[in-house]
Image: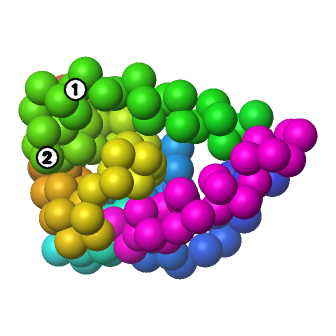
Amino acid sequence: MTEWLFEAIRALPPAWVVVILSAAPISEVRGGIPAGLILGMPLSAILPLAVISNVVSVLPVVVGFNWVADRLANKPVLGSIISRLIRRARSKEAMVEKYGVFAVTLFVAIPLPVTGAWTGSLVAAVFGMRFGRAVLCLTLGVLIATAIVTSLSVAGIHIFEALTLTP
């Protein structure tokens, strides 16, 4: 399965790889930016694609999660999945109360697993954040995460190149 996925991705144009990985819930900009660099794309092309695709991909969650959750709450399998997602979002309540509107920005800005724009949009929806404020927080968080991931990726590539050079 993994080999098939890598072959499918390898067949795509590099810009598509950046967009798909940046929009995907698990990888987000943490996957899109390094992939673009590895594929030889310039940062000037990678960064707008990564940021825009990451932010735009989560807007339906902000707008429609609560509506979908209400309709699926009493379904056997989907209801339990929705309940788990809501519990995950509610587990951030202390952070939201402590930091207010900045909680979503900070949460999205930390480029670690289970943080990012997808979970941040879920938190914004569950806590009823206004759409404009949610988009602003998500965008700022993605921009901060982008700066962190870009710095670490570029540094990692330079270190790897320095270590692999033969004297």
Give me the disc on residue 101: 2
Q: Is residue 60 above or below residue 70?
A: below
Which residue is more in the foreground, 116 or 163? 116
Which residue is more in the foreground, 164 or 121? 121
The residue that appears at 66% across and 42% down in the rendered structure is: 82
Q: Is residue 62 magenta?
A: yes
Res 32 quadrant in image = bottom left
The residue that appears at 66% across and 71% down in the rendered structure is: 11
Res 91 quadrant in image = top left
Q: Is residue 93 above or below residue 59?
A: above
* Residue 34 shows in the view: no
Residue identifier under label 1: 95
Q: Relative to residue 66, is residue 125 drawn left or right?
A: left
Q: Amino acid at mark 1?
A: Met
**Circle 2 SS class:** loop
The residue that appears at 21% across and 72% down in the rendered structure is: 132
Tell me residue 149's x, y (percent): 23, 43
Q: How many marks?
A: 2
For the N terminus, the quadrant is: top right
Res 96 quadrant in image = top left
Q: Is residue 71 magenta?
A: yes
Magenta range: 55-79
Tell me residue 48's x, y (percent): 24, 74
The residue that appears at 43% across and 47% down in the rendered structure is: 126
- Please report whichever mark, 2 or 1, sits nearer to the chain's N-terminal start: 1
Q: Amino acid at mark 2?
A: Val
For the C terminus, the quadrant is: top left
Which residue is more in the foreground, 52 or 160? 52
* Residue 80 shows in the view: yes
Tell me residue 147's x, y (percent): 13, 49
Q: Main secondary structure of the magenta part?
A: helix
